[in-house]
Amino acid sequence: MTDRSRLDGHTQELAEIQRIVGEKGWSTDPGVLSAYTVDETKSYRGRSCLLVMPKTAEEVSAIVAVCARAGVPIVPQGGNTGLVGGGTPDGTGAAIVLGLSRMNAIRAVSAQGNTITVEAGCTLLEIQKAAEEADRYFPLSIGSEGTAQIGGALSTNAGGVQVLRYGNARDLMLGLEVVLPNGEILSTLKGLRKDNTGYDLKQIFVGAEGTLGIITGAVLKLFPQPRGFQTALVGLSNVGEAMELLSRLRTATGDAVSACELMSRTTLQLVLRNVPGFSDPMEDVHEWYLLVECSAGDNQDILREILETELAEALERGAILDAVLAENEVQRATLWRMRHTIGESRKPEGVCLDHDIAVSPADVPDFIARASREVHAIAPEGRLCIYGHIGDGNIHFRVLQPDPREGSAHAWDDPDYTARISAAVYDTTLSMDGSISAEHGIGQAKVEKLEKVKSSVELALMRKIKNTLDPQGIMNPGKVLVPCPSERPSD
Ligand code: LAC
Ligand code: ZN
């Protein structure tokens, strides 16, 4: 809902901002704003006085300068597909939402240099397609890639299903254009592969979730376009064997494994039940499934043969229980759609506690066993929907309430109860030197948790950086870092 009093308090600034972007570039209509003040998971609902949609970095710069002068908070927002409330304004209505959707030009593609220069509002899919047109490959791939924008993906250092081979968003970034909290534009859009000229300033904005500035453009790495993909779904009885198979396939293929996604039977069941168009991919039911994909150049037949041989040997050893290979692009697409709809498949299932954690890949089997035990000690009725990017040690450890079709589960409405369950997952993670946020970020969801898990040295340094760049705290306030008590305005 639009906050009129806040709006009135800054009439002059808001008029100035509206002038900067022109009439197509803003809205104060509550009906329009409502889509920008709630997050993808519907867990975070805020308010805002103005949505502004600039078209150029210069417009962003001018808007930020006005806000800096008047102390108006800004919430940058990309495709609004984040999972931790990082792009949602708070409930005060004081902040403007600055959407990047209209900054969606592909500025340049260099097939020789293997780079693409894009504006922040390009979706990942648009970048993938632009790369493909130049016979190049942009590998950042997540379920929401048709909507998620590169500015947001860089701001959260998104991961996805190809990190194993190509790295996180950070690893794909060669240069950035950022509007700083005082309105200055920092540009490093050179596309250099090597540049050791002092502090690598651009890195600080990746994963900063818009708290240090607004990413408006980027130079990204491109790769040779794979000539084909060899994709298999494997059924197994334990996670240790999944790790072993990944290790063997990486060696046998000369590290041509580009994705390796684990899912538990419960995870697959939810997709089969809640997303139309899928049937059980194997005759028998297995406790675990592994979606594994290799890609390469012109040597597709060799790759296929290696995959078949490795899977046949694993079957013979009893290491895996079944395997199906995609015979064509349609079958491959079906397997990937199955994987990418895991996120939405939980929607009709009631309370779902989501934990995006990372441990060392070697610790994945142990983590899953221990976290499952700890959670079930508190909530034996909890359904474990475990899946993730095992080659990166990144597990999405979801705990769901009992099936809502089989009656109500009152305990799951009790925040103390669900907090104990989540604590069990995070404590297990931390006891294994893991991370409480592998690829989704901190946003609003984990702000307080971050205070508990980072060392005082890290927190102090993070605050120093924040205060240096954004002394007024106008850039995406309340995300990533809470102001320390002495910095809170009321103190
Ligand atoms: C995925 C998102 C939730 O891997 O990170 O599906
Ligand atoms: Zn993921």
Image (spheres, rainbow, N blue to C red):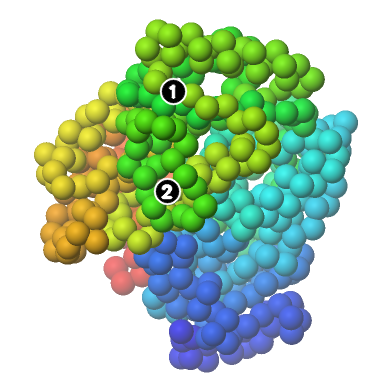
> Which residue lies at the image location 62% right of the left edge and 88% below the top edge?
12
The vertical placement of 299 against 375, above or below, is above
How many numbered dots are placed on residues in this image? 2
Q: Using the image as rendered, state which of residue 306 and residue 202 is in the foreground.
A: 306
- Using the rendered view, name the quadrant where residue 283 is placed: top left
Which residue corresponds to mark 1?
A: 322
What amino acid does circle 1 point to?
Asp
Disc number placed over residue 127 in the picture, else none: none
The vertical placement of 415 against 325, above or below, is below
The vertical placement of 65 against 32, above or below, is above
Which residue corresponds to mark 2?
A: 272
- Using the rendered view, name the quadrant where residue 141 is placed: top right
In the image, is 330 to the left or to the right of 388?
Answer: right
In the rendered image, residue 209, in percent from the top left (x then y), is placed at 52, 53
In the rendered image, residue 123, in percent from the top left (x then y), is placed at 67, 55
> Which residue lies at the image location 40% right of the left edge and 8% below the top edge?
317
Tell me the distance, in whole angstroms, between the alpha carbons under discs 1 and 2: 19 Å
> Which residue lies at the image location 47% right of the left edge and 62% below the top edge?
40
In the image, is 455 to the left or to the right of 305?
Answer: left
Q: Is residue 140 visible?
A: no
What amino acid does circle 2 point to?
Leu
In the rendered image, residue 157, in percent from the top left (x then y), is placed at 54, 43
Packing grade of label 2 (10 A; few <14, some 14-19, many >=20) is some
Q: Earlier in the sequence, mark 1 or mark 2?
A: 2
Q: Is residue 364 visible?
A: yes
In the rendered image, residue 268, in percent from the top left (x then y), is placed at 40, 42
Q: Quadrant of the C terminus?
A: bottom left
